[in-house]
Image (tube, rainbow, N blue to C red):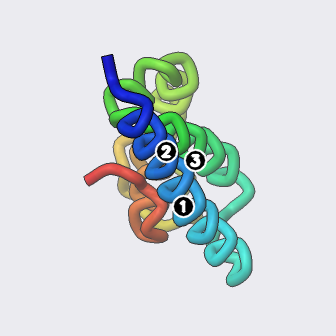
Amino acid sequence: MQSFETREESSHRKMHDASVYSARIQEAMRYDKLSSANYSLAMTLMNAVLQGYSEERWKTERESMIKALTLKSPDKNVAHADAANLYEQMVGCMKDLDLWPWQ
């Protein structure tokens, strides 16, 4: 069992990470770089950051959304038009904006 201090430090770190991530989203929006299509993905990623989820945990939580996106063709008018599917395209765009929270 974690001590209170360890839990508190973990909570503080998660809040800090989410705050930094939120600032990145705001910056992308300020310069009109975050498309409305990617905004909802950014919000699910921010929630994952706040919860301290790993990429695998996030993928498990969002399995149905990811599956639906992988079944769609990429948007030919957006960056990463050569991606295998819409999910891969969205991930590529998020990485370009430094909004993909995992390596």
- Quadrant for the N terminus in the image: top left
Q: Residue 66, can we see it? A: yes
Q: Amino acid at mark 3?
A: Met
Q: Nearer the viewer, residue 71 or 32?
A: 32
Q: Are marks 1 and 3 in contact (CB under 8 Å)?
A: yes
Task: Tell which circle, 1 or 2, labels the residue nearer the N-terminal end.
Answer: 1
Residue 100 is left or right of residue 48, and the answer is left
What is the count of numbered marks?
A: 3
Q: CA distance from mark 1 to mark 2?
A: 8 Å
Q: Are marks 2 and 3 in contact (CB under 8 Å)?
A: yes
Q: Position of residue 58 (x, y in %)?
A: 44, 29
Residue at the front extreme, as displayed:
4
Residue 50, quarter of picture:
top right
Label 3 SS:
helix
For disc 3, the marked residue is 46
For disc 2, the marked residue is 49
Q: Position of residue 73 (x, y in %)?
A: 50, 40
Q: Position of residue 52 (x, y in %)?
A: 43, 37
Q: CA distance from mark 2 to mark 3?
A: 5 Å
Relative height, residue 4 to residue 23 (above, below): above
Residue 32, quarter of picture:
bottom right
Residue at the bottom extreme, as displayed:
31
Q: Residue drawn at (48%, 47%), measured in percent from left and top?
A: 14
Q: CA distance from mark 1 to mark 3?
A: 7 Å
Residue 28, quarter of picture:
bottom right
Label 1 SS:
helix
Q: Amino acid at mark 1?
A: Tyr
The mark found on residue 21 in the picture is 1
